[in-house]
Amino acid sequence: MKYISLIALTGFALLASCSSNPKKETAAATTDTVLAADIKQHIAVLANDSLLGRKPFTVGEEKTIAYIAAQFKKMGLEPGNKGSYFQDVPMVEIKSNPADMTIAGKATMDLKPGMDFVASTRREVPAINLKNSPLVFAGYGIVAPEYKWNDYAGLDVKGKTVVVLVNDPGFQSPEKFFKGDTMTYYGRWTYKYEEAARQGAAGVLIVHQTEPASYGWQVIQNSFSGSKLYLQQADKHMNRCQVEGWISEEVAKKLLGDAGVTGDIRAYARKKDFKAVPLNSTVSLALTTKLKYAMSHNVIATLKGSTTPDEYVLYSAHWDHFGINKPVAGDSIYNGAVDNASGVASVLSIAKLFTQQKEKPKRSIVFLSVTAEEQGLLGSEYYGTHPVYPLNKTVADLNLDALSDFGETSDFSITGKGQNDLDDYVEALTKPLGWTVVGDTKPSSGSYYRSDHFNFAKVGVPALDLHNGANAVGHDTAWGQAKLKEYNEKHYHQPSDSYSDTMNTKGMAQTTELMYKLGVKLSNETTFPGWKAGSEFKAIRDKAMGK
């Protein structure tokens, strides 16, 4: 009960401090130092070299999930999946090896893999031979009835390969399309692949442009080549296009230019009378694959509610990282201390807080640590499509991913702020403390679609991804922003994201305590938070809830 006592005591301290100078005093006054120490201890274990970077399909996975399950059991939490702490997640590893790509016709080019294009397949077959597939420019590759937008209108793409633009029409548009510079899911590259497959295309090539993609061509070269993990499917992914890939902007300009699409190709595709453009060229590409099948695992535990145990508040965090990989400065173990030992540590600490409550929550609380986030949000996707608990009875997903380690802040950041009612809950909890809540600093990058909360949003469950902010207590804003920049540029997805005794986990404790309080509130209500008007996930939830 000492956690609860500390929270209660700091709450009283807050009331006193708010009446004087809240912005100066409240952040420091509320930090639970015991909670911060607990989080730090979990990170020290989860980011230890002995876990080998926590990569799925390795001994590191076995050690990681065993530790998390043991912690849940020690707290007295029930196994969350029919008597087990584990949910099997069947995956396939596909390594695609493309040959040169040949474009023939109006445009003629011989393109080199990794230089001019990247390409792979999800189809679980030994080889793919895309031969003389007609190329069509399908604009943004979007079908969005709510925005009265259909780039595939009147277009038959069976056997053809579509060339599409990254992001959506709203990006840097002089007119208001979609959500302006805030990317919708229609702008995400994963959607482009999905829609092309729904349309029956043989192949799909996304045109890379640095600004609308929010990353350079080198990211495509590094991240979209080599082996990839996918969830196993009964049809062996034969419902997907034969080829999924990207082409460089230079290649795209020549290809489109030879078909009369010149100048600003984004503006061309935004025109209200836009119709798909046959490129009068064909593409041929052969690739071979290496397949490996294996089982990974989500870890899940439950605290049964006292009054409405068939309604669930769910916490999530991914346990995986990149394992042993390319050495940097002599270190080849990618420990992922911030990303995302911090999130798992936070969920474990929240679980402990709930088990030490004097009174049980009325609704059940689910603690879920998922696999393969770094491979494409696979563990959460599997849970979303194979839920252990009914999605229309799941109140919310509260996700924790990569909490900053530079101490307390007077602000918090909500990824995709404005999507659902959970934003209002956070603001109601932070406002009395003098804390501020901000949204994405770069909404065009589509951050809301890049962590596990998205797979809950995708199936309609209101989802929140909360981070500590940049206004570090005791420092000016520039200092905190510099710390965030330093992590992103020097440590993100690098071996240097490792545990150190000098890590300041007080800011992590702030965020953890805030998420705990939010869960307490949700767990004792009878209502369900919803999606705000204009969210692309609202219709899914409304249908699931019988609205």
Image (cartoon, grey):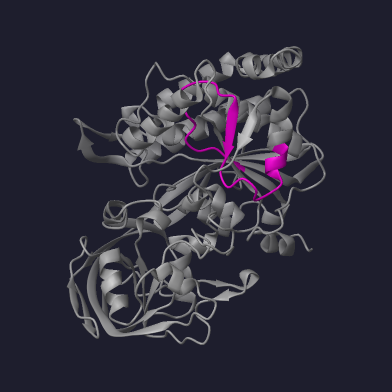
Which SS type dominates the magenta stretch? loop
Which quadrant is the N terminus positioned in? top right
Question: Can residue 101 be spotted in the picture?
Answer: yes
Horizontal side of residue 401 vs 202, given as left or right: right
Across and down, in percent, residue 40 comes to 47, 21
Q: Is residue 422 magenta?
A: yes
Which quadrant is the C terminus positioned in? bottom right
Across and down, in percent, residue 434 comes to 68, 24
Highlighted range, magenta: 398-425
Q: Residue at x 56, y 44 (%)?
A: 415
Q: Residue at x 67, y 46 (%)?
A: 396
Across and down, in percent, residue 247 comes to 29, 66
Residue situated in front as seen by the camera: 455 or 101: 101
Horizontal side of residue 505 vs 210, given as left or right: right
Horizontal side of residue 52 vs 4, given as left or right: left
Q: Is residue 275 magenta?
A: no
Across and down, in percent, residue 39 comes to 51, 23
Which of the 4 image quadrants contains residue 320? Answer: top left
Residue situated in front as seen by the camera: 154 or 444: 444
Total of numbered circles in the picture?
0
Question: Can residue 118 be spotted in the picture?
Answer: no
Q: Residue at x 61, y 59 (%)?
A: 459
Q: In the figure, 371 relative to 24: above or below?
A: below
Horizontal side of residue 267 vs 410, given as left or right: left
Q: In the figure, 306 relative to 396: above or below?
A: above
Which of the 4 image quadrants contains residue 513? Answer: top right
Residue situated in front as seen by the camera: 362 or 405: 405
Residue situated in front as seen by the camera: 215 or 296: 215
Q: In the figure, 195 relative to 441: above or below?
A: below
